[in-house]
Image: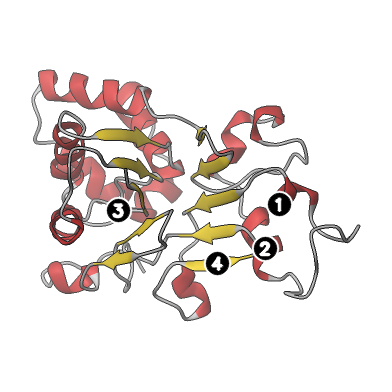
Amino acid sequence: MRTIVIGDIHAGFRAIQQLINKINPVYTDRYIFLGDYVDGWSEAVETVDYLIEFATKYSCIFIRGNHDYLAFRYLTKKEENPQWLASGGLETKQSYAKISAEKKKEHISFYKGLKNYHIDEENRLFVHAGFTNDKGPRYEYFEHQVFWDRTLWEVAKSMNPQLTVDDPKYPKRLTLFKEIYIGHTPVTRIGKTVPLNFANLWNIDTGAAFKGPLSAIDIQTKEVWQTDPVWTLYPEEQGRN
């Protein structure tokens, strides 16, 4: 059985279609999506529709991203956070302006059912952003921290690679899990476009909302699949800056 982790899609419906075609799914696969399904490109509704349908055929775990939380707040409470609108939310708002009440209800149910994090049978953590509590995400004082935090990524990528896990300076948060898979902070910020590994942490956000591809990784073999740079699939759009 393959367990395949997929990074931040950001309404790149054409990209997730291309990625899944490259993966060539089989019925024994398990898919873990790291969140941020919307906000970026124009096809938020189409992307969520695709994911809902995909989950009827394959075993899927959907993690909640910060953009998914904000889209949910818009759909249920009409909250229009100016920062959200400027960060892809406007495109999501426009996409949802076209849907029926029945479809809106279906999508609200999808967003409501997202998980803040998942820990598998081998003690691997899957979370959108990270966590700050040195006992793990379950103990976060603010539960939403798991889809906003950037400190875990900053700690892991700035570590001395010679530091061993038994060293007292080794970050305690990184000792809690066999592996940690995150999205949220695009690796394009440090000039990369492939999933990156520091210590036992893997970042799968390869900048699909900006100038990078959408990526997936098999957590056993570490095989990686990637799409074309997503902006090339939407030549008529600007995407996020």
Question: Mark 3 — residue?
Answer: 9
- What residue did someone put label 2 on? 156
The residue mark sitting in front, 1 or 3, is 1
Q: Counting residues from the N terminus, which is met first, the one under dot 1 or under dot 3?
A: 3
Name which of mark 4 and mark 3 comes first in the sequence: 3
Viewer-nearest residue: 197 or 138: 197
Residue in the foreground of this view, choosing between 185 and 173: 173
Whichever of labels 2 and 4 marks the residue nearer the N terminus, that label is 2
Observer-side mark, 1 or 2, equals 1
Seen at 27% across and 67% down, the residue is: 226
Q: Earlier in the sequence, mark 3 or mark 2?
A: 3
Measuring 16% from the left and 43% from the top, which residue is drawn there? 95
Q: Are marks 2 and 4 in contact (CB under 8 Å)?
A: no
Provide the residue designation for mark 1.
174
Where residue 240 sits in the image (x, y, percent)? 33, 64
**How many residues crowd around disc 3 within 10 Å: few (fewer than 14), some, or many (20 or more)?**
many
Amino acid of disc 3:
Ile
The Cα–Cα distance between marks 2 and 4, rounded to whole angstroms, is: 9 Å
